[in-house]
């Protein structure tokens, strides 16, 4: 199995499992001011990511950020507002009038929308195999969670949560390449912390943040250090390797992880329906990601190796298919772990060709 493909799939799966397992931590923060909690979480995450940015052989983060256009900065602000703050706010608002399963079912449909939107934005047709696999993942997520009681407001906010989940992947695609997973995660976390602070001051005034209790402090630290720092970097590294369509398939593991960990804290059970849904999610991920087909794995690896930024199109990615790259991109060197360098510059060579309609 191609190493690039295997690492990308493993990183996307690991990030989704972290998010799903974090749902138990969210219940501890029910009484903490929303905006203040988001500001603390993302502010701390940005600080924790800073030491990972200054690595030997990598461009200086300040130089990379200075080269961003106003449009790219606007995209980063939108990513933080929609995919991070907006998503969390929508889930919280939905759960005030709906059972947690309701927004979970809507969010489980994210792979279908991403499988359609990302190819269309790149000027190519959606892949039938990925679309079918995304539908299978969505059905599996529904089976795991079931459908709970809700009202109109719960449905509206659940749709907002779906938009946030889709935006977290789709909005990030054009800025992932120039920034890389680590710098992208650190930048959007810093922006989200500022946006959360402004929101808190407007809504709650000076009381938007308070000293957390011991349990709240542990939950905030978990969300910042594990879910945000490790989860975000792993997610974007995985997306960088296998593409947004396939990476989002692994978001179906979020309700599976939540269902598996719920019995540990006495907030749910894992029965036959959860097991059947988990199998459907696993089958959808395996089919859509190409794990069951050697040809599928090779096409994913080749397309990932052939992606380069076109010098005349700074805001989009040009896709080249069925090309051989001089080496494997994003190969960690000796001593580099999951959060190591994003790529070895000596192994990256631009390939000039016309855009194709293959996988990213």
Image (cartoon, rainbow, N blue to C red):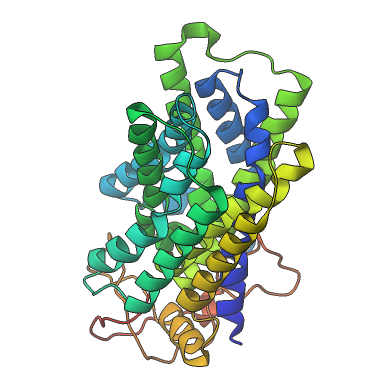
Residue 176 spot, x, y in % from top left? 42, 59
Q: Is residue 63 above or below residue 203?
A: below
Residue at x 53% of width, y 62% of height? 250
Q: x and y percent of residue 72 in the render?
A: 31, 49
Q: Is residue 233 left or right of residue 72?
A: right
Front residue of 281/167: it is 281
Q: Is residue 297 above or below residue 102?
A: below
Q: For this view, does 50 lie left or right of residue 135?
A: right
Residue at image position (53%, 36%) is: 100
Considering only vertical position in the picture, is 349 above or below 197? Answer: below
Q: Is residue 334 visible?
A: yes
Query: From the viewer's perspective, is 123 left or right of 283?
Result: left
Quarter of the picture containing the N terminus is bottom right
Quadrant in which the C terminus is drawn: bottom left
- Identify which residue, 114 or 109, lies in the foreground: 109
Residue 332 place in picture, x, y as percent: 65, 72
Is 112 above or below relative to 48? below
Q: Residue at position x 65%, y 53% from top?
A: 257
Quarter where residue 134 is shown: bottom left
Q: Quadrant of residue 276?
A: bottom right
């Amino acid at each position: 199995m191609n190493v690039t493909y295997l690492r990308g799939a493993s990183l996307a799966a690991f990030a989704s499992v972290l998010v799903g397992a974090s749902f138990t931590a969210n219940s501890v923060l029910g009484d903490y001011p929303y905006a203040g909690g988001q500001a603390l979480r993302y502010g701390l995450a940005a600080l924790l990511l800073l030491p990972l940015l200054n690595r030997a052989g990598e461009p200086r983060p300040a130089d990379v950020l200075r080269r961003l256009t106003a449009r790219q900065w606007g995209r980063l602000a939108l990513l933080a507002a929609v995919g991070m703050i907006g998503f969390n706010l929508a889930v919280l608002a939905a759960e005030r009038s709906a059972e947690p399963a309701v927004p979970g079912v809507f969010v489980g449909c994210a792979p279908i929308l991403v499988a359609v939107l990302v190819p269309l934005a790149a000027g190519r047709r959606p892949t039938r195999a990925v679309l079918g696999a995304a539908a299978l993942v969505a059905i599996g997520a529904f089976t795991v969670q079931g459908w709970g009681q809700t009202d109109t407001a719960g449905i509206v906010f659940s749709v907002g949560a779906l938009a946030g989940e889709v935006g977290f992947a789709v909005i990030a695609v054009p800025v992932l390449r120039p920034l890389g997973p680590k710098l992208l995660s650190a930048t959007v976390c810093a922006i989200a912390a500022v946006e959360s602070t402004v929101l808190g001051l407007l809504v709650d005034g000076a009381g938007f943040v308070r000293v957390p209790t011991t349990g709240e402090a542990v939950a905030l630290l978990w969300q910042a250090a594990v879910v945000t720092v490790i989860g975000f970097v792993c997610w974007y590294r995985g997306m960088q390797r296998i593409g947004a369509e396939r990476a989002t398939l692994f978001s179906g593991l979020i309700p599976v992880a939540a269902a598996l960990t719920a019995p540990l804290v006495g907030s749910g059970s894992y029965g036959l329906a959860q097991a059947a849904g988990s199998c459907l999610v696993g089958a959808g991920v395996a089919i859509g990601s190409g794990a069951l087909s050697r040809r599928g794995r090779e096409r994913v690896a080749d397309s990932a190796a052939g992606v380069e930024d076109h010098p005349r199109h700074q805001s989009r990615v040009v896709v080249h298919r069925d090309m051989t790259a001089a080496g494997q991109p994003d190969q960690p060197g000796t001593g580099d772990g999951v959060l190591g360098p994003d790529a070895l510059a000596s192994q990256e060579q631009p390939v000039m060709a016309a855009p194709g309609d293959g996988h990213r």
